[in-house]
C-alpha cells in the first residue's frame, strides 16, 4: 500500500465509530514507513557517494613479443605510516608511527616485475625458480635500478623503484578496495609465505588463492601420512609426530575449503529454522514461564544468525581471493620481497612527513613485503628490512613505478612505445 493509501486509512480511522487503538496503530505504521523511507534514502546517498566515479584504466605497455607490463594509478593522499606498538608481529624499526603525505599521483606496477618482462629488457634471467610468469628474483638493487633506466628509455616514461613511503601507501590503498581481506588472520591465506608457498615462487598476477593453497597443502600432507604409516608398520618410534603434522595440514585444508564452510552454514540454517519454529510455538501457546523461554530462544536465534553471517563473510573472502580487478595490485603480501629506492635506517626518527625518501647513505637499501620464504608477520604493510644493494637472494625481487613528468603525462594512453 502506498502512502496515499495509508493517509486514507488514517482519515477513516478518525471516525467516532472506530476504537482509539486502531488510530494509534495506523499512526505508528505511518511514522515507521516514513522513517524507513528516510533511512533508505540516506543509505542510498551514502552508497552513491562511496562508489563515486569508476577507477581509471591501468596503463599497459608492450615490451615486444606480446609481453606487457601494467601500471595502476595511485592517487595522492595522506596515510599513517608504520605500525603501533600493539600490532601483532611488529618490529622496532617500524616506528615511530606518523602521518605521511604523498603529494603527487604515481603509477605502481600491478605486480612484481616478471621473469619474461626482465628478460625482454635486460636480455637475461637470473632467477632461481625459472618460470616466465613468476616474479624475477635473485637480482641486486643495482640490477633493479638498471632495469628502471632501460625501461624508461624504451617506453618514454620516468620509471623508478618506489620509495618505501610510496610502497606502503600503495599497499594500504590497495587494502581499501572491496573484497580484499586485510586482517592479520587472513594474511596467511591472502599472500604466498613460508606456510603455504610450497618452498617456491608463484605467478606474479595471482594471489594465494584458497584452491591453489589446498593443492599445495595436500601435496605436503599425503607424504606425511604415508610416511607415518610406513614408520608404524615397521614398529619404529616417531609415527605419532608424523601423523600430528599431517593432521595440522588437514585442519588448515578444511579451514581454506569454502565447501566445508558452506556445509556448516547449511547445518546452522536448519538449526535456525527449528529455533524460529520453537519461538513461534512458545509465543502462540503462552504456557507457564513463556516469556523467559521466549527470551532464551531469541538469544539462541541471535547467536545462530551472527555465526551464519560470519561464515558467509569468510566464504565471500575465500572466493574473492585471487580474482583479478582492473584497479588492483597483486603480491603486496608475499611471493617475493621488493627493493625500494631509500637507503635503510633503523627507524623513522627525524624523517620527513611529506614525500619522504631517505637519501642518507648507509650500507643497505630498503626491502619491503614478505616472500615465499618468510613468516606471515613479514607480510604486513609496515614490515621493513635492510639488505646490501649488491647482494642477490632468491626471495628478493622488485616492482617499479612511473612518476608522471607533468600534467600531460598523467593522461598517457597505453600502447607500444
Image (tube, rainbow, N blue to C red):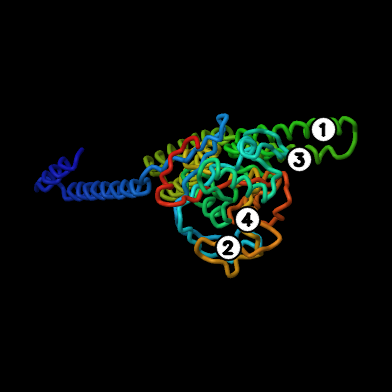
- Do the CB atoms of the residues marked 3 and 2 lie less than 8 Å apart? no
The residue wearing badge 1 is 227
- Upstream in sequence: badge 3 or badge 2: 2
> Mark 3 falls on what kind of element?
helix
Is residue 25 visible in the rendered structure shown here?
Answer: yes
User: Which tag, 4 or 1, sits closer to the chain's start?
Assistant: 1
Foreground residue, 13 or 125? Answer: 125
Residue with the mark numbered 3: 245
Q: Residue at x 46, y 44 (%)?
A: 178
Q: Of callouts 1 and 3, which one flags the residue occurring earlier in the amino acid sequence? A: 1
Q: Quadrant of residue 244?
A: top right
Question: Spatial distance from mark 3 to mark 4, Cα to Cα?
Answer: 29 Å
Give the percent coordinates (x, y) of residue 66.
55, 30
- Distance between mark 2 and mark 4 Cα atoms: 12 Å
Q: Secondary structure at mark 1?
A: helix
On the picture, is 307 further left or further right than 196?
A: left
CB within 8 Å, label 2 to label 1: no
User: Would residue 256 be visible to someone looking at this image?
Assistant: no
Q: Is residue 139 left or right of residue 1?
A: right
* Mark 1 touches mark 3? (CB < 8 Å): no
Residue under pointer 4: 383
Q: Residues within 10 Å of mark 1 (few under 14, many from 20)?
A: some
Residue indicated by mark 2:
84
Q: Nearer the viewer, mark 3 or mark 2?
A: 2
Amino acid at each position: 500500500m502506498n502512502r496515499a493509501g495509508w493517509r486514507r486509512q488514517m482519515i477513516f480511522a478518525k471516525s467516532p465509530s472506530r476504537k482509539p487503538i486502531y488510530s494509534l496503530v495506523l499512526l505508528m505504521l505511518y511514522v515507521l514507513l516514513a522513517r524507513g523511507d528516510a533511512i533508505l534514502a540516506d543509505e542510498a546517498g551514502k552508497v552513491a557517494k562511496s562508489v563515486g566515479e569508476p577507477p581509471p584504466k591501468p596503463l599497459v605497455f608492450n615490451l615486444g613479443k606480446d609481453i606487457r607490463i601494467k601500471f595502476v594509478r595511485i592517487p595522492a593522499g595522506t596515510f599513517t605510516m608504520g605500525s603501533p606498538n600493539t600490532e601483532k608481529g611488529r618490529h622496532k624499526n617500524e616506528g615511530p608511527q606518523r602521518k605521511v603525505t604523498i603529494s603527487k599521483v604515481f603509477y605502481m606496477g600491478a605486480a612484481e616485475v616478471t621473469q619474461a618482462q626482465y628478460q625482454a629488457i635486460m636480455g637475461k634471467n637470473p632467477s632461481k625458480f625459472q618460470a616466465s610468469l613468476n616474479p624475477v628474483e635473485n637480482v641486486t638493487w643495482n640490477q633493479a635500478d638498471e632495469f628502471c633506466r632501460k625501461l624508461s628509455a624504451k617506453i618514454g616514461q620516468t620509471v623508478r623503484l618506489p620509495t618505501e613511503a610510496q610502497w606502503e601507501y600503495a599497499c594500504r590503498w590497495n587494502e581499501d578496495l572491496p573484497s580484499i581481506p586485510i586482517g592479520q588472520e587472513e594474511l596467511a591465506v591472502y599472500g604466498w609465505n613460508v606456510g603455504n608457498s610450497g618452498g617456491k615462487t608463484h605467478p606474479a598476477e595471482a594471489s594465494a588463492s584458497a584452491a591453489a593453497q589446498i593443492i599445495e597443502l595436500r601435496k605436503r600432507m599425503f607424504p606425511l601420512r604415508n610416511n607415518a604409516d610406513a614408520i608404524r608398520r615397521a614398529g619404529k618410534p616417531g609415527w605419532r609426530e608424523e601423523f600430528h603434522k599431517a593432521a595440522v595440514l588437514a585442519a588448515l585444508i578444511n579451514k581454506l575449503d569454502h565447501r566445508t564452510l558452506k556445509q556448516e552454514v547449511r547445518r546452522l540454517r536448519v538449526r535456525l529454522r527449528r529455533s524460529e519454529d520453537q519461538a513461534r510455538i512458545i509465543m502462540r501457546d503462552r504456557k507457564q514461564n513463556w516469556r523467559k523461554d521466549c527470551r532464551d530462544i531469541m538469544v539462541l536465534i541471535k547467536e545462530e544468525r551472527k555465526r551464519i553471517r560470519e561464515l558467509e563473510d569468510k566464504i565471500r573472502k575465500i572466493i574473492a581471493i585471487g580474482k583479478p580487478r582492473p584497479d588492483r595490485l597483486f603480491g603486496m603480501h608475499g611471493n617475493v620481497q621488493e627493493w625500494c629506492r631509500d637507503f635503510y635506517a633503523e627507524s623513522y626518527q627525524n624523517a620527513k612527513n611529506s614525500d619522504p625518501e631517505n637519501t642518507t647513505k648507509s650500507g643497505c637499501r630498503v626491502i619491503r613485503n614478505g616472500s615465499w620464504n618468510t613468516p606471515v608477520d613479514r607480510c604486513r604493510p609496515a614490515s621493513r628490512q635492510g639488505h646490501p644493494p649488491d647482494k642477490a637472494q632468491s626471495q628478493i625481487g622488485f616492482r617499479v613505478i612511473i612518476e608522471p613528468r607533468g600534467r600531460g603525462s598523467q593522461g598517457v594512453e597505453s600502447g607500444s612505445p
